[in-house]
Image (cartoon, rainbow, N blue to C red):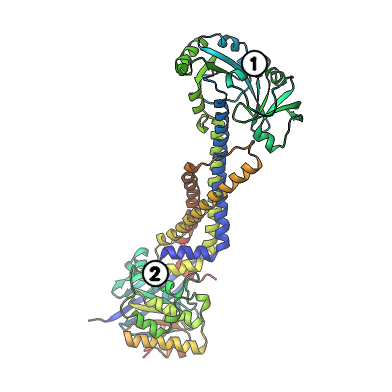
């Protein structure tokens, strides 16, 4: 039985900018197993963010096959991709992207409401304990440090028990101490709960926290290191 | 949760929220105050006509049932003719002339009018003796601090104020009929004839008789029916004016909410991207903005009603005689619906713009 959570074959993505075609992905092949923590590395413009957007259902592929938890992303309509984001994907962004008007608890609750869940999933309290944000839930983002905001963002990403946690440069805006804290948390989550994680980064130290690392350049995957 | 997001968004930009709601409130107030003023003035006119004690009113036979305030359309010679008809105890010709913006002056033969009305009640001074003598009602005298013996210039004519009377009968200014006829080039003409019957219960029967006899010249109408004409729907010009103000209110409400929502969408581009990344459908994004617009409109309506009450108190304190204003609570839901309609129209384009926003572009918006 194939346990791959993500299967990508010959993935191409071309953006049309005026008269110019920009080939962001030029035939990507990738497989991520269920419960795996994968880091995707590469310089700016290598196509890793485009891969992140396609795997997260934020953009459709131009060509190739992309399966996420058994769903064929090329066959999905925009509305179906939106539903996939609700149920299968948890996003963690570099800039945290919490809604500034809501408290930490409400940011998590909003994601939960959009995912059509009525209560926190079993074990979510333990995740909040692990993230160390239980005492900060009543605070708004502006009253929290960057590290705290990123941990709230991780909690928000996990509240709907996604199949995959997609993290785009999750430590890009954090100092070393908070970076280590967040990366350790991601690794702990992966080990304790078996959460599949795909992390985009250009920092080798951050990538070292993952089980496996792939490197991208010019829209292709160059190497895969375990 | 969506409701909480809506309220928190409005709280977050509270100055903009308050200002937008205030403008919607002014829009609601303008509608409600206009209706209150229209009704107040019509009610005031109706009360004054009723206060004369007449049973039947004779007006020019114009062939339609709308209310007209045109002066001098009835030949005065009809007055003695009507006075001699069976069951008529008294007939008095009244000439009406607009003075100032919405205040009017009545010219009457004072002695004849006293017989029909049971007599004006003088608070100071007494009945007119000379051609330039003027009576003013109490509210107008108080508003303009007038007192007996004073000269008052009206219709470019100097009048000698000889009496201040209790209001509720005829116009605020009462002068000798012939003087007003001369001043307004309405010689031997009046606006209407007030008729007192010897038996008021015969009014409906007599109205039919009068209409038979006076067909083509005058139209008789019982006092009850005449009072029912004092309605906004019977004054086409007023109806049109209210429609224009209402349309303007919708446009203002639309523009204010449009601007507020549009700037909110631009400001919150990144947040819209976050919502989409979290799985919000386009309709959810529109829904959030529509709910914000609805809350703005509802706050605006509440503010508008409060402003209307304040405006009424201010109008009655400043110009109780010139601007009689009443409450129009039956128009609260109508004004609210108008404000809500404007707000919803204003939210549509910004809502659709937000819904169409590309999630990736929105997330990279600084």
Q: Residue at x 30, y 72 (%)?
A: A71
- Residue B82 in percent (x, y) is at 56, 11
Left-right relation of B99 to A3: right
Looking at the rendering, in which quadrant would you find the N terminus of chain B? bottom left
Image mark 1: chain: B
Question: Relative to the observer, which residue lies in front, B2 or A23?
Answer: B2
Instruction: Name the image quarter holding residue B67.
Output: top right
Q: CA distance from mark 1 to mark 2?
A: 89 Å
Badge 1 marks a residue whose secondary structure is strand
Does residue B76 lie above or below B10 as drawn?
above
Q: Residue at x 28, y 74 (%)?
A: A70
Q: Is residue B155 visible?
A: no
Label 1 Cα crowd, 10 Å radius (few <14 / some 14-19 / many 20+): many
Instruction: Name the image quarter holding residue B169.
Output: top right
- Residue A180 in percent (x, y) is at 46, 89
Q: Which residue is mark 2?
A: A62
Does residue B109 lie above or below A54 as drawn?
above
Q: Which residue is mark 1?
A: B189
Question: Relative to the observer, which residue lies in front, B9 or B92?
Answer: B92
Q: Is residue A221 visible?
A: yes
Left-right relation of B178 to A71: right
Question: Relative to the observer, which residue lies in front, A60 or B35?
Answer: B35
């Amino acid at each position: 039985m194939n346990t791959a959570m993500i299967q990508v074959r010959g993935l191409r993505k071309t953006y049309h900018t005026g008269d110019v075609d920009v080939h962001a992905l030029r035939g990507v092949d990738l497989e991520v197993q269920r419960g795996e923590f994968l880091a995707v590395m590469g310089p700016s413009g290598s196509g890793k963010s485009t891969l992140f957007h396609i795997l997260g259902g934020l953009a459709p592929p131009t060509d190739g096959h992309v399966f996420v938890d058994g769903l064929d992303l090329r066959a999905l309509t925009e509305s179906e991709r939106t539903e996939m984001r609700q149920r299968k994907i948890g996003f963690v962004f570099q800039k945290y992207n919490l809604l500034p008007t809501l408290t930490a608890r409400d940011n998590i609750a909003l994601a939960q409401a959009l995912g059509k869940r009525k209560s926190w999933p079993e074990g979510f309290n333990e995740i909040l304990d692990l993230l160390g944000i239980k005492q900060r839930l009543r605070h708004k983002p502006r009253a929290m440090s960057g590290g705290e905001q990123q941990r709230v963002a991780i909690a928000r990403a996990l509240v709907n028990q996604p199949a995959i946690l997609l993290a785009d440069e999750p430590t890009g805006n954090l100092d070393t101490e908070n970076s280590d804290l967040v990366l350790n948390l991601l690794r702990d989550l992966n080990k304790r709960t078996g959460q599949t994680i795909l992390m985009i980064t250009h920092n080798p130290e951050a990538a070292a926290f993952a089980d496996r690392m792939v490197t991208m350049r010019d829209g292709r995957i160059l190497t895969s290191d375990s | 949760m969506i409701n909480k997001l809506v309220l928190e968004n409005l709280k977050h930009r509270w100055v903009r929220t308050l200002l937008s709601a205030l403008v919607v409130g002014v829009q609601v107030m303008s509608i409600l105050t206009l209706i209150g003023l229209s009704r107040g003035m019509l009610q005031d006119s109706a009360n004054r006509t009723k206060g004369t004690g007449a049973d039947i009113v004779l007006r020019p036979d114009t062939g339609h049932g709308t209310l007209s305030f045109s002066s001098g359309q009835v030949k005065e010679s009809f007055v003695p003719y009507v006075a001699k008809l069976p069951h008529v105890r008294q007939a008095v010709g009244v000439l009406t002339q607009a003075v100032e913006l919405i205040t009017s002056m009545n010219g009457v033969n004072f002695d004849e009018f006293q017989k029909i009305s049971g007599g004006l009640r003088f608070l100071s001074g007494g009945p007119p003796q000379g051609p330039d003598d003027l009576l003013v009602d109490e509210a107008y005298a108080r508003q303009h601090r007038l007192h007996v013996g004073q000269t008052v210039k009206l219709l470019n004519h100097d009048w000698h104020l000889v009496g201040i009377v209790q209001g509720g009968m005829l116009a605020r200014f009462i002068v000798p009929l012939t003087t007003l006829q001369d001043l307004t080039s309405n010689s031997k003409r009046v606006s209407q004839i007030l008729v007192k019957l010897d038996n008021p219960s015969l009014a409906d029967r007599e109205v039919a008789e009068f209409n038979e006899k006076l067909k083509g010249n005058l139209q008789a109408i019982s006092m009850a029916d005449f009072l029912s004409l004092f309605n906004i729907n019977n004054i086409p010009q007023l109806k049109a004016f209210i429609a224009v103000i209402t349309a303007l209110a919708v446009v203002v409400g639309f523009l204010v909410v449009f601007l507020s929502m549009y700037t909110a969408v631009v400001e919150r581009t990144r947040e819209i991207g976050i919502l989409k990344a979290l799985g919000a459908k386009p309709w959810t994004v529109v829904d959030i903005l529509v709910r914000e617009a609805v809350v703005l409109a509802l706050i605006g309506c509440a503010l508008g009603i409060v402003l209307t009450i304040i405006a009424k108190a201010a109008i009655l304190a400043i110009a109780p005689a010139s601007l009689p204003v009443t409450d129009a609570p039956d128009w609260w839901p109508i004004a609210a619906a108008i404000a809500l309609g404007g707000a919803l129209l204003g939210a549509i384009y910004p809502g659709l713009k937000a819904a169409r926003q590309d999630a990736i572009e929105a997330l990279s918006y600084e």
